[in-house]
Amino acid sequence: MNLDLTIKKTWLYKINPSLKLLVMVLLFIGVLFVHQLNMIVYGTLSALLLLILFSGHPPKRLALLSIPFIIVFVSTASSMILFGKGDTTWFKWGLIHITEESFYRGIHLGFRALVFATLGLTFSLTTRPVYLFYSLMQQVKLNPKYAYSFMAGFRLIPIMIEEFQTIRNAMVVRGVQQQKGIRSFYFKLKSYSIPLLSQSIRRAHRIAVAMEAKRFSEVKKRTFYYKIGFSGYDVVFIVSWVFLIGAAYYLSLNVPILPTGDVRYE
Amino acid sequence: MTNRHIAASVTNLRLKFPDDPQLRFKDLSISFEKGEKVLLLGPSGCGKSTFLQVLSGLIPSSIEVPVKTEDIQLPQSWGYVFQDPDTQFCMPYVDEEIAFVLENLCVPRQEMPTRIKALLAEVGLTFDDLHTNIQTLSGGMKQRLAIASVLALEPDVLFLDEPTAMLDPEGSKSIWDTVKNVSDEKTLLIVEHKLEHVLDLVERIVLFNQNGEIIADGEKGYILTHYKSTLKEHGVWYPGVWEDYLRSRTKPLMNDPRAEIVFDLQGFQGLRKKDPAITVPSATITTGEWITITGANGAGKSTLLLSLMQFLKTKGTYTLFGNSVKKTRNVTEYLTFVFQNPEFQFVTNTVYDEVAYALRIEQMDEQFIEEKVNERLECFGLNGLRKHHPYQLSIGQKRRLSVAASIIKNPPVLLLDEPTFGQDSRNTFALLEMLEEYRVNGTTILMVTHDEEIVKHFATRVWKIDDGQLTSDYFNVEKELVNA
């Protein structure tokens, strides 16, 4: 199983991971208070711009990773469009009632989901977990116990995927797929999850013992192989966000794409 | 009481696992001098590994097990190398893993890169880039990395708990060469049942019995000559174990000469990500053949078996009993596969149900199933364990169960991926003999193995795989068959 995503290291990689996380969380919260449709459309576009231009991943991979998010966009938007409240009716058929207000609110919700996805993807595609946890230990004083547990956990994921494939093959050999009916679904669930879980628990326990055998302990004092600090890129990152948000605000007022403002229904 | 010449010692050790009715150790006392190289031997499950964990202090500090001692002297500085290469590391890259140990010791950051390079050099590992993903290393390299990271602790005592159990012969040799190089002044306490390389290293052998009692303790030559039968009984791979076995075994029988063609492969390729990972130019296999597949790590041995099972996409001609596999919907009707880790194949809650499973799917008569399963359990030595959960069995029993469950329907072809891997000699011989019996009755066996002795004494035909190609295919003339 190959999970190695080789990429070009752009300036987004050089930002302090804790700072990046903080900015992303602030943006997440901020987006919740944006009710101007054009503002959120421009906001999404600027986030997409950052992702496409500076994540360092090939466009094809980005497109592939966006598929689930497009589905989220369509499903969130469509349920609001089809069933939301509104006064200016465009279309009505049974339970389905599309109004102008519900349509724009649906689009707004869709974009909100999309901007979350874009920000999350930008963060996870440009941050190495190891650096994130080293940074959290150094800047946020995260207890090393948790940081190293997470890093050890990350190592287990590709091993588990490989194991899952082996179990699937083993089940074919045993003839499990020949069983039919609802009971067989429960049976299959059990046949996959028990060996996977038992192996993982055993492995986690062994790793924990091995870590303690290497003198990893509760004592907080330790040195760090990676010194994660701040650099000019952090300033660039913050300034670029201030600029992008400012630009989105200005454009939403002066060059609106869609003919509506606040989408809340009074 | 501490003695300057003693590396580690324990007096009247008592230890009990919560689920066991009996004490694992009862009043065990032993001491090891500084600089001694000691090998601990005993049957599997006698508590050797547990004993190492007590002496290192991992029990009870990291693994909580009730333990009582009158007096215990733990080594001042020690390092512990474990069995499984995949569960020793907590970081994804080589440099980060060693740095983890250095961080724990509060080594200043500036000194780390030089220390890491020096430690890797000590175990004979060189990388163009220290930032190499651990997952890309072979098992032998991983274990050497484990030794390097343990050496960072600058230990006086090294505990080695079957460090080569999961390695091929080449990897095993590299580990013991490495240990020899780094252990000059150090005390070594080793648990290992493959004695081939480790014997050059040790001076003293401590022999345990099934109940965790020490039955012998002395100079290695003395133990090897006076306790040979005990070693044999315990399944230890002592030097000369094969000669002793061959002397006692009955000559293998000739199989039914009316052989039928099972496989016909022409330009057969197994693909991984659309690229051919294994190529078999041309081969036919008949009933009653036992083919061993050998080759270096990653050469494509397991890939060949997976391709034959159609778990991978394949190209070329592949006929099974005269029918093209493309038309055969289910190759599992003819072929069965025994995986390296038997646990993956278990689907039920008891040993009995496990063996009965394949027959129950076919909705056979329950009485017939019972007869058949009982006979099979008897033959595989699992009769007393029928109500146990498969996971509760020992590693040798699990392996036997996975074979028993796979072949209950008498499939004509058996594929095995290193079935003797990490097994003691007794279990290995027992399994090989069972397979031999099936072969004589006409079953075709394809088996991946690293063990040259198995190839020599059990294979009727040998396949060698180099770099994804079947490069050599010959009949084994050393295996003499006699007429029934």
Image: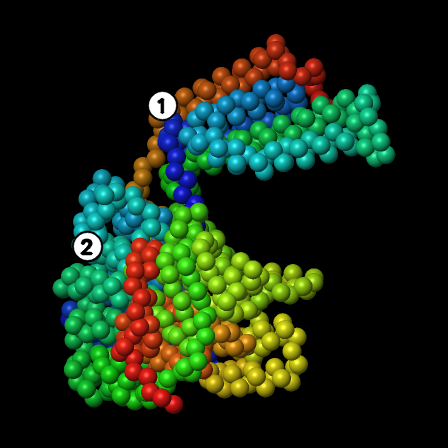
Q: Amino acid at mark 1?
A: Gly
The three-letter code of the residue at mark 2 reads Gly
Q: Indicate the secondary structure of the residue bearing disc 2.
A: loop
Q: How many marks?
A: 2
Give the class, few, some or many, for how many residues have Cα within 10 Å of label 2's Cα (few <14, many ≥20). Answer: some
Observer-nearest of B422 and B323:
B323
Is A211 located above or below residue B341 in the figure? above
Give the labeled residue for mark 1: A232
* Residue A20 makes an appearance in the image: no
Percent position (x, y) of residue A101? 76, 23
Residue at (68, 26) in percent of width and height:
A107
- Asked if residue B112 is positioned above or below residue A50 in the image, the reply reads below
**Circle 1 chain:** A
Circle 2 sits on which residue? B124
Left or right: B186, with B278 as reference point: left
Q: Nearer the viewer, residue A70 or B408?
A: B408
